[in-house]
Image (tube, rainbow, N blue to C red):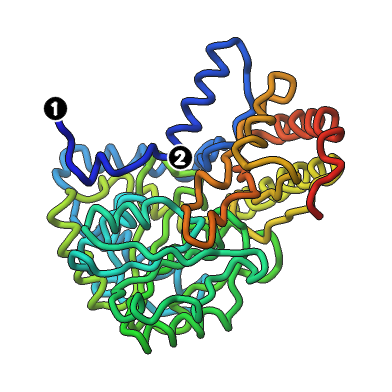
Amino acid sequence: MKTSKRLSSLTGYAFAEIDNKVKDLRSEGISPIDFGVGDPTEPTPEIVRKALSDGANRHASGGYPNYTGSDEYRTAIAHWTKKRFDLDLNPATEICASVGSKEAVFNFPEAIIDPDDFVIVPNPGYPPYARGTLFAEGRVHYANLLPENNFLPDLGSIPADVCKKAKLMWINYPNNPTGVTAPASFFEEIIAFGKENDILIASDEAYSENYYGKNRPRSILEFTKTGVVAFNSLSKRSCMTGYRVGWVSGDREVVAAFKKLKTNIDSGTPTFIQDAAVAALSDEVHVLELRNLYRKKRDIMVDAFGKAGLARCCPDATLYIWQKIPNGFTSVDFAGKLLDPQIAIVTTPGSWIGENTPEGNPGEGFIRLALVPSVEECELAAKRIEKFLSGTCTTCQK
């Protein structure tokens, strides 16, 4: 069998490769501590699981779900958005349920671009931004996220011919993998950029609730609903990665286009899962508990790398640490060093998340850690890092 050109042109999916590394270690009798994939290991909150069970019974013969989300779910999203961002959204016209966030992100370019249109994508960034573009027969322009620019895209460096041909630009704050949040001035700048160049701005806000400081991350929709659309999910907020439930909101014309696309792709999120999502959105107690838990794990790991001689890379938000690596290593080499049996820690090489550009791969020089192991596992990993890395990190970048 010969696969399509689209599929054969793709390299391996980075996080699938990490899963394979974990399997290899386990086959050798080694139990690694897995910081590779951002899949929370904490149990889904009881209030959510109970609503799921009750919903399954209530909808025992419910049939296909509504493509765009139940009235109850979309109304719950609107209420939560008002409370969280002081932002009014019309549940009927400005919100659409999605089957998780990855699926929505990947499919979205099909509603917006034509073949050879450009999509501007953050680099490093979530792979579906680019891969969804390629499957829609678009062209990707990578906007590199560099430490000297606080991991914000340099809009002035985007070539004029790209701006002219671009229909869509992705942003993601709080940012995966760098862990930074964006200031209000950036949202104002990106909105003006989109308006000036007739480019739709798509804001991936999946980590809006995973933050550590007192200043809560902003939504682009707080600044305008015209020419912008936001993607959100309950995967990380409420440990619901397996539930596949999220939403798209913003400009009503864009949401209408996404609805039209979606009805031709899937049959909607199961209604009983939407019931569980309603329960999740109604409760902030578990969100605060998870936030405190991730903060504790973050501090353990940041301190461990610091004691081993590495630069302190303390994120503002997300579940990730974007750790600068020692001089003399590539990101793949250093991730491999951490796989030594005496350390046995799985991380993601930054170069696997970043893409090669004429200016280089902005993921090179970093590794990403997802703070999904338990506190006890983080403490064990910290001891191994402090014990076995200190000698190799005397020339680390500061």
Q: Depth check: give the residue in front, 267 or 37.
A: 37
Which numbered dot is residue 14?
A: 2
User: Type of residue at label 2?
Assistant: Ala
Q: Residue furthest front?
A: 358
The answer to whether 7 appears left or right of 389 in the picture is left
Picture coordinates of residue 71, whole percent (x, y) = 26, 63
Q: Secondary structure at mark 2?
A: helix
Q: Which residue is mark 1?
A: 1
State which quarter of the image contains the C terminus: bottom right
Picture coordinates of residue 371, whole percent (x, y) = 63, 42
Which numbered dot is residue 239?
A: none
Q: Secondary structure at mark 1?
A: loop
Tell me the quarter of the picture where residue 228 sits.
Answer: bottom left
Q: Depth check: give the residue in front, 281 or 254.
A: 254
At a point 59% along the width and 37% down the height, the residue shown is: 332
The answer to whether 232 appears left or right of 70 in the picture is right
